[in-house]
Amino acid sequence: MRVSPLYPISDKTRITFSGLKARDAVTVPDSSKPQLLKSHIYVFAFQKEKNIEQWNAMDLSQWEFYALPMKRLQQLGWKSISLTMLRSLQSPLTASAFIEAAKTAIKEAAAEIHSQDADTHS
């Protein structure tokens, strides 16, 4: 028998992904410097199964995936993003669709980094 979750998900539950911005982790933290987005691509995953008897973390059909480039999150300017907002920005991806979307996002981010490096060294 499974134990009921302490905070069951309902249609009224507000799911938020937070902690998107951070200070530099390489040097001593300086609170006078702003927190920034640190990744080129942000990946969000949400286990959507509400029935506790059917819930299975290993069943990828129960998951929604999202991949947003840093530029898109910079435009929003937030430290967190809600699942509702993610769904309005992008359709949920299945695990297999996510693989292709991630490959595309990585190629685009790599091209942008390469372009920035070329501009810096010109």
Image: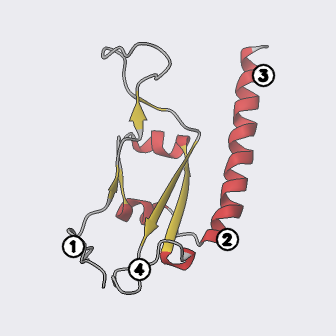
Q: In this figure, which residue is indicated by the disc labeled 2?
A: 96
- The CA distance from mark 2 to mark 4 is 20 Å
Q: Nearer the viewer, mark 2 or mark 3?
A: 2
Side (left or right) of 60 relative to 25: right
Q: Can you say whether 44 is above or below 4 in the image?
A: above
Q: Could you tell me the amino acid type at mark 3? A: Ala
| Residue closest to the far front | 1
Q: Earlier in the sequence, mark 1 or mark 4?
A: 1
**Numbered mark located on residue 102 in the image:** none
Q: Could you tell me the amino acid type at mark 4? A: Trp
Residue 69 location in percent, x, y? 57, 46
Q: In this figure, which residue is indicated by the disc labeled 3?
A: 118
**Numbered mark located on residue 55 in the image:** 4
Q: Nearer the viewer, mark 2 or mark 4?
A: 4
Packing grade of label 2 (10 A; few <14, some 14-19, many >=20) is few
Q: Nearer the viewer, mark 1 or mark 4?
A: 4
What secondary structure is found at the residue carrying circle 4? loop
User: Image quadrant for the C terminus?
Assistant: top right
The residue drawn where x is 48% and y is 61% is 45
Q: Are marks 3 and 1 in contact (CB under 8 Å)?
A: no
The residue drawn where x is 35% and y is 40% is 79
The quarter holding residue 6 reads: bottom left
Q: In this figure, which residue is indicated by the disc labeled 1?
A: 12
The quarter holding residue 10 reads: bottom left
The residue drawn where x is 24% and y is 73% is 8
- The CA distance from mark 1 to mark 4 is 19 Å
Q: Earlier in the sequence, mark 2 or mark 4?
A: 4
- The CA distance from mark 2 to mark 3 is 34 Å
